Image (spheres, grey):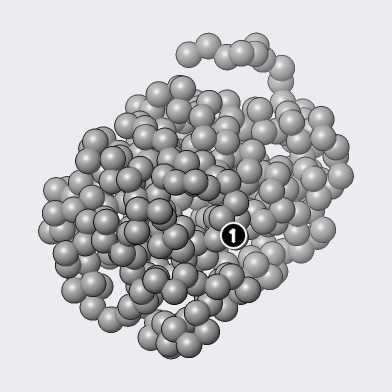
Amino acid sequence: MKIVVFGAGAWGTALAMNAARHPAGHAVTLWARNAQQVADMQARRENLRYLPGVPLPENLALAQGDALQCARDADLLIVATPMAALRSFLALLRDCQVPLAWLCKGFEAAPADSDSFGLLAHEICAQVAPDLKAGALSGPSFAQEVAHGQPTALVAASAHEAVRHALVQAFHGPSLRVYANDDLIGVEIGGAVKNVLAIAVGLCDGLQLGLNARAALITRGLAEMTRLGLALGARSETFLGLAGVGDLVLTATGDLSRNRRVGLLLAQGQSLQQAVASLGHVAEGVYSAHTAVQRARSLGVEMPIAETVVALLDGRLHAADAVALLMEREPRAEPERG
């Protein structure tokens, strides 16, 4: 296959490396917007900024400049940009006739002067590129581990069988397993909400509240994620798989998680601005929390953990008070019905 990955951050680079090493012998191009970054990667054969110390495969081509020209004759397009850039890329690629998948997780930020909600990736695609055969590649994955060839399992989610098939063909191999799923809404909700919940778990761990509290937050957080997903048309079983509980556990407990790190830093008394600045990369949960809560309220869905994260991020709650609020919730039946 001829595969083009747009976006040379950590995850885009790691996935391009994986495809370039695939036994099928794919021809893979990694595209970056910044010409200097491409020149540096070409000279060093390493993405020094995002994946230092991991050599790029010799057969991985690097490109910059005209993205549409780069996409020409490809068999599969991967958009590995942050959520903020997804709309412009989908608009650019809207007439492409080959399968396309995005890697970003979360909600698009709503315009400041608008009452509208931030959108999930498939909703953005429906607006700007409705004819694209598109979907998402998601699941529990840290870029560093994929780049090093450590075992990982992902979900290829799309309503289009051709997209699911292309993603499996491109990436399923000795160290990376790819499982097809046609519940794109559920997979995207899992990817968006787990980042918010990881902030709460990081806060809990940063305050050294123990493993019992961590398990309770993850389990109740999964229930919140599922409620929102069902209200938006997802299937419940999706949240018991890789894109639901799998991605949640990884992001909430893994030390490579930026969203977990935000919670840990807030527990140490840092401000949100200090915490985000120290990361050096985007923590999507900071931006997704408000939209997740807005959408839940509009649907009459209760998300007390996400609500508490929003209050914490807005400075309306201190760290210790946020955890106390979560623990003081009224008891309810478990498992929940409906």
Relative to the observer, which residue lies in front, 57 or 220? 57
Whole-percent x and y of residue 195? Answer: 57, 47
Relative to the observer, which residue lies in front, 61 or 99? 61
Whole-percent x and y of residue 288? Answer: 50, 50
Relative to the observer, which residue lies in front, 23 or 27? 23
Q: Secondary structure at mark 1?
A: loop
Whole-percent x and y of residue 39? Answer: 43, 87
Whole-percent x and y of residue 190? Answer: 49, 38
Res. 83 in view: no
- Total of numbered circles in the picture? 1
Which residue sits at x=56%, y=55%?
Answer: 149
Q: Is residue 276 left or right of residue 337?
A: right
Which residue sits at x=84%, y=47%?
Answer: 207
Which residue sits at x=23%, y=50%?
Answer: 99
Residue 119 in the image: above or below residue 157: below
Residue 225 in the image: above or below residue 122: above
| Residue underneath mark 1 | 148
Res. 20 in view: yes
Q: Quadrant of the N terminus?
A: bottom left
Image quadrant assignment for residue 12: bottom left
The amino acid beneath tag 1 is: His
Which residue sits at x=22%, y=41%?
Answer: 162
How busy is the neighbourhood of tag 1: few (under 14 within 10 Å), some, or many (20 plus)?
Answer: some
